[in-house]
Image (cartoon, helix red, strand yellow):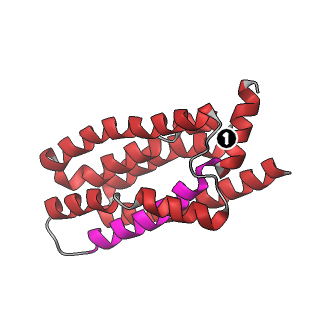
Amino acid sequence: MDLNELKKDCALKQKKGLPFIMASVLIWTAILCVHLTNLNPLAKNLLTFCCTGPLLPLAFGISKLIGVDFQGRGNPLTKLGMIFTLNQILYLLIAMWVYAAVPEKMLMVFSMIFGAHFLPYGWLYDSKSYFVMAVAIPFLSLALGLYCPPFMLAAVMIGVEILFSILLFLEVKALEK
């Protein structure tokens, strides 16, 4: 297979990462619940990090429900997709610094990193939705993070991730045709 065929195969078998985006709706819902509490900002930030823990098991469960080949064996680009994800972990060090230095802005930085990590998936899946979200989420997060309380950012992120899921679903359906 040539590169374009491998990319298309990956996009089809992985449904353009739809299980992860759908799981992120649940993660952002948990984050919203945390930020609606009366806990202090440091506790909220710690719980925000904890909320991300179930992402992989949630995505795995969703992949089973929607018929995604979760491991994508046989396509070397699946490993590249995992490297794209692992890259985000390095940027979370910035969010960890903000956690202590400017706790009231940690969710903003966290959300910006979350959105920006979608950029290489735009290439991997030939997805306009990933490219758009990779730019839109960080700018939206910056604007909301500067002028709104963190719970509003979390609430907007739920809507953004639902929209993103719908857009990816439509892209996958078009690709399957």
- What percent of the width, then of the height, locates residue 173? 78, 55
Most common secondary structure along the magenta stretch: helix
Q: Residue at x 57, y 58 (%)?
A: 19
Residue sticking out furthest to the right: 177
The crowd level at tag 1 (other Cα within 10 Å; few <14, some 14-19, many 20+) is many
The reply, left or right, for residue 42 in relation to residue 131 is left
Pick the front one: 81 or 153? 81
Viewport quadrant of the N terminus: top right
Pick the front one: 138 or 82? 82
Residue indicated by mark 1: 10
The reply, left or right, for residue 86 in relation to residue 75 is left
Image position of 173 with respect to 114: above or below: below
Q: Residue at x 24, y 51 (%)?
A: 105
Would residue 93 be counted in the magenta stretch? no
Q: Which residues are magenta?
A: 16-36
The reply, left or right, for residue 56 in relation to residue 151 is right
- What percent of the width, then of the height, locates residue 133? 55, 46
Residue sticking out furthest to the top: 2
Would residue 32 be counted in the magenta stretch? yes
- Quadrant in the picture for residue 127: top right
Q: Residue at x 65, y 61 (%)?
A: 166
The amino acid sitting under disc 1 is: Cys
Residue sticking out furthest to the front: 74
- What percent of the width, then of the height, locates residue 160? 52, 59
